[in-house]
Image (spheres, rainbow, N blue to C red):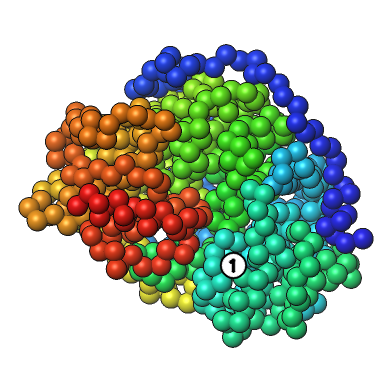
């Protein structure tokens, strides 16, 4: 029987479609008061040992003690964790050898390990019947469960298959798959044999895929016949065929049958199921060095060419492991639901490597937040009994717009922690997440990090029960992370309240090692602007208490008459306005002020208030919340915002429209709905 067939036959249980009325009362929107301080009762320095590994350290009693220890003794801190959390073939001889100025990072030197052993085999041997993956397929109620033992068989067979076709240590393998157990097994099979995976989000175009395949010189591609999202079929294999035609390096394409569609197979194509069937379920893992590359992942920079960010075996894995456990207070036996696609770093660290290295049960969400309706996440929470959900603010804002009833009809009592990542979580969305989704009893974990950081760096309460949480900010640095705020003139902004360029002073194990094939670009992008520091590209505000809030990319920071303003700051105010569903603020050239402010605002459904009245009220609101110089010069009530498939707003397009440069819009093909651009242009031209 084919692997996919066997997988389907091994569905352990499906508890679909039952509807429990929430046992807990939900605060109505009118009851929701804006939260200005902490929800928890006790303060940050509660006296619990945050990590078992440091229980016997005489001077560590509180979160803060351990945080200081992690900064002052990074080698002892990370070395202890590396030995306790990971299994090694050979112990490392030195914990770190790093130089921020040169962008040189080496962790756990001479150590030998295998990531697949750490993520699968060690758990399969101890607890093989434990569920590793819950595949939440596109159609609600059709989920499939994969145990650690089953995952081990998949990984071993796939690793043997890759080896059998000549793939070896260091070779790059492009993965273009829907979120599925096969996608996870493909990543881990690469890890097992030391091949470097490059997962490309299965929503990218053929050209984008070809660019990534060629940059990595990948000879092997793993894909599927079709994807399935929101009830729609996505022609993955066709896209791969077009990408392969544009590339000159691909030698083989393994094709997994997701839908079973009758698709043409060319001379490079191989059936993944048939190839796997031939293979043994035993496979010897490659002995890898701590610093061998585990994967590369492309991300956008300020220039057009995407950067292939590379991550290491040991340092990356340890950082994903420790952050997953302590940021979300993950407890053994819980079900962790990170809804990000495996094509993004969030999927790598918090769907695959973090959860599996902790022996957790992780959910693979294949669908969309609005399929078949805006209750999908919460219906899934009820059906699968999720304890953690980790999602993007953009989806929260979309769901908020659809109304509370979609949440309230499902039982969310299993939820303990509500995470989010990727962009600032504005106040209104935070309050909604906290009060409506979480019924006021779950911590909101706003996490700041980047593809380059490998894992979460700023987050409200890593493993510190009872610590206060302030709305709409990721707040505190994780262990080992020392944020620094810098001024453009290279002066450090010391002390409390300040706004500046967000940098990180000390190396941590999860930091990226290079940009594939271009180490100079790596150094120039991250280590030159503020010598000796890692520059994140983001701006941040630090409060009097020392809590961090991200003000947006530095390239999204506006300078209005010499006043520095984060677009996110203005959006936060606009989003708080009761009629706003979501908004995006960009700068545009202004004759007198240098830069003016242009606000695109999507209204909630059914708003009938005249636009000029809304405009006046919004300007007043911004004036009262920030300052008169922060008032938008132009407000467009937009039919929608141009978003990429990962949910990011394509601000470049909004800036060009605002600047009246319709001929310079550039490529909009990666937008979910490119037609929205035409509508925005038309509206803009009618108004000016
Ligand atoms: O601008 C920050 C924003 O997302 C950027 C990193 O994007 P990417 O590499 O695609 O990784 C996204 C998922 C880790 C950052 O430079 N960002 C990420 N998290 C937050 C955020 N902005 C505000 N608040 C956050 N919590």
Residue 415 screen position, x and y as percent: 62, 28
Residue 484 can be seen, yes or no: no
Judge from the rendering whether residue 317 lies leftward or rightward of residue 429; answer left or right.
Answer: right
Q: Is 346 positioned to the left or the right of 150 in the image?
A: left
- Provide the secondary structure element on which disc 1 rests: strand
| Residue drawn at 49 percent across, 69 percent down | 308
Q: Nearer the viewer, residue 73 or 32?
A: 32
Badge 1, how many Cα within 10 Å: few under 14, some, many 20+? many
Q: Relative to 658, is 304 above or below? A: below
**Residue located 58% across and 64% down the image:** 200
Q: As rendered, which of 478 and 205 lies closer to the eye?
A: 205
Q: Camera-side residue: 517 or 648?
A: 648
Q: Position of residue 673 (x, y in %)?
A: 48, 55
Which residue of the protein is positioned furthest toward the right in this rendering? 1
| Residue drawn at point x = 43 percent, y = 14 percent | 31
Q: Can you tell me whether the CB of the residue at mark 1 lies under 8 Å from the nearest atom of ligand 1?
A: no
In the displayed structure image, the side of residue 101 where residue 7 appears, left or right: right
């Amino acid at each position: 029987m084919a692997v996919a067939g066997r997988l389907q036959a091994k569905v352990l249980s499906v508890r679909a479609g039952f509807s429990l009325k929430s046992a807990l009362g939900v605060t109505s929107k009118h009851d929701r008061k804006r939260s200005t301080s902490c929800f928890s009762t006790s303060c940050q320095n509660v006296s619990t040992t945050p990590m078992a590994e440091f229980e016997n350290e005489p001077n560590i009693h509180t979160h803060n003690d351990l945080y200081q220890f992690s900064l002052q003794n990074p080698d002892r801190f990370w070395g202890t964790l590396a030995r306790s959390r990971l299994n090694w073939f050979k112990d490392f001889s030195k914990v770190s050898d790093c130089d921020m100025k040169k962008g040189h990072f080496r962790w756990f030197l001479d150590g030998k390990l295998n990531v697949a052993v750490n993520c699968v085999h060690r758990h399969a041997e101890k607890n093989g019947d434990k569920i590793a993956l819950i595949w939440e397929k596109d159609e609600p109620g059709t989920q499939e469960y994969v145990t650690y033992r089953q995952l081990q068989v998949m990984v071993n067979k796939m690793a043997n298959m890759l080896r059998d076709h000549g793939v070896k240590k260091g070779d790059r393998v492009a993965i273009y798959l829907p979120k599925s157990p096969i996608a996870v097994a493909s990543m881990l099979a690469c890890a097992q044999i030391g091949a470097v995976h490059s997962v490309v989000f299965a929503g990218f175009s053929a050209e984008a895929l070809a660019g990534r395949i060629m940059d990595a010189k990948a000879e092997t591609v793993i894909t599927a016949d079709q994807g399935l999202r929101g009830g729609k079929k996505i022609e993955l294999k066709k896209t791969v065929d077009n990408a392969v035609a544009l590339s000159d390096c691909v030698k083989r394409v393994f094709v997994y049958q997701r839908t079973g569609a009758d698709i043409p197979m060319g001379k490079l194509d191989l059936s993944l199921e048939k190839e796997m069937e031939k293979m043994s379920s035993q496979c010897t893992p490659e002995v890898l060095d701590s610093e061998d590359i585990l994967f590369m992942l492309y991300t956008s920079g300020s220039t057009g060419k995407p950067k292939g960010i590379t991550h290491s075996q040991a340092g990356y894995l340890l950082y994903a492991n420790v952050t997953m456990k302590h940021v979300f207070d993950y407890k053994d036996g819980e079900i962790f639901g990170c809804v990000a696609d495996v094509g993004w770093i969030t999927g790598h660290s918090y769907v695959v490597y973090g959860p599996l290295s902790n022996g957790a049960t992780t959910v693979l969400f294949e669908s969309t937040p609005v399929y078949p309706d805006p209750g999908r996440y919460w219906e899934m929470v009820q059906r699968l009994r999720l304890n953690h959900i980790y999602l993007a603010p953009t989806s929260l804002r979309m769901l908020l717009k659809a109304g509370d009833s979609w949440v309230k009809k499902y039982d969310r009592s299993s939820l303990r922690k509500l995470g989010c990542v990727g962009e600032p979580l504005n106040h209104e969305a935070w309050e909604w997440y906290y009060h409506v989704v979480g019924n006021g009893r779950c911590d909101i974990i706003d996490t700041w990090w980047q593809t380059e950081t490998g894992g979460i760096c700023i987050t409200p309460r890593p493993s510190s029960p009872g610590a206060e949480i302030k709305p709409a900010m990721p707040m505190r640095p994780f262990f080992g992370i020392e944020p620094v705020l810098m001024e453009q003139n290279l002066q450090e902004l010391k002390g409390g309240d300040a706004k500046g360029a967000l940098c990180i002073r000390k190396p941590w194990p999860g930091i990226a090692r290079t940009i594939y094939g271009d180490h100079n670009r790596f150094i120039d992008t991250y280590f030159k602007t503020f010598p000796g520091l890692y520059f994140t590209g983001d701006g941040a505000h630090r409060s009097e208490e020392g809590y961090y809030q991200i003000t947006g990319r530095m390239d999204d920071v506006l300078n209005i008459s010499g006043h520095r303003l984060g677009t996110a700051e203005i959006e936060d105010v606009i989003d708080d306005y009761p009629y706003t569903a979501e908004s995006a603020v960009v700068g545009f050239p202004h004759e007198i002020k240098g830069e003016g402010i242009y606000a695109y605002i999507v209204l909630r459904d059914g708003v009938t208030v005249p636009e000029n009245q809304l405009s006046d009220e919004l300007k007043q609101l911004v004036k009262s919340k920030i300052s008169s110089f922060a008032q938008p010069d132009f407000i467009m009530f937009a039919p929608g915002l141009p978003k990429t498939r990962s949910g990011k707003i394509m601000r470049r397009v909004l800036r060009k429209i605002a600047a009246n440069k319709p001929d310079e819009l550039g490529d909009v093909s990666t937008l979910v709905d490119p037609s929205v651009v035409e509508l925005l242009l038309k509206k803009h031209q009618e108004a000016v």
